[in-house]
Amino acid sequence: MLEAGYPEAVGLNQPLDWSEAVTVIAKEKDPTSERFHWLLEHIEQEWKEWLRVKAEAENRLSDLSEQRERITEAMVRYQARRRPEASPLAEVSETGEPRRFESISLADACEILLREAGRPLPAGEIMTIALKNGARTSSTTPYNVIVTAMQRDKRFIRLRPGLWGLSGRDDKSPTMTAVG
């Protein structure tokens, strides 16, 4: 067993410098010397430690990859439940229009309508179109529900009383000024 101060005694500094160790081994004329065996022993220990740490890291990476896959699958399932794709044979309202907003939130319906319009719309028009397309609310004042939904959602911007647009699109218009 080598004493703790052995590296200093043989001219090495701790921690073990790999380039220095390789140089010493390459210059060593006597492969049976104590210094040579000490270096080989420590290099072997360091190599085993490196392999152990590498295996732990690979296992952790594998675990994280599996967790990521499970989370991604859960997100896809959640989004599929939240936004089912409309069937070409989707139910229609009394007016014969598809009920495409029946299973999504009012805020999502408002965003779709504003994107399709390509311009800001009055809240009353948004409400009328959304309700005709199957949006649901149990409130006796759907206008207020839609306005409240848009006020609470960062996707929308109130350009002036009663006129709503999409943040990032309509708030940059030179003719529109955002308020409240």
Image (cartoon, rainbow, N blue to C red):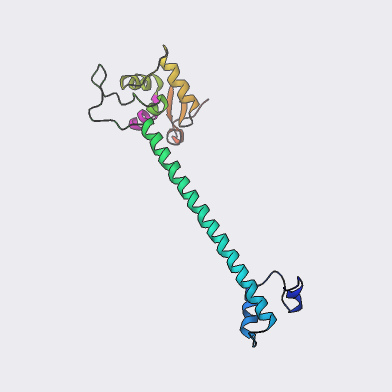
Q: Is residue 161 visible?
A: no
Query: Magenta stretch mostly in which secondary structure?
Result: helix
Query: In the image, is residue 23 above or below residue 153?
Result: below
Q: Position of residue 57 (x, y in %)?
A: 54, 56
Residue name at image x 24 percent, y 17 percent: 95
Of 82 and 179, nearer the camera is 82
Q: Which residues are the magenta region?
A: 111-121
Say whether residue 114 is magenta. Answer: yes
Question: Front-most of 115 and 163?
Answer: 115
Q: Nearer the viewer, residue 110 or 31?
A: 31
Residue 109 rendering spot, x and y as whole percentages: 37, 27
Residue found 57% across the figure and 60% down from its top = 53
Residue 148 visible in rendering: yes
User: Relative to 128, is 89 above or below?
Assistant: below
Q: Position of residue 132 (x, y in %)?
A: 31, 19
Is 58 displayed left or right of 12 in the figure? Answer: left
Q: Residue furthest top?
A: 140
**The N terminus lies in which quarter of the figure?**
bottom right
Q: Quadrant of residue 99?
A: top left
Most extreme residue toward the bottom is 29
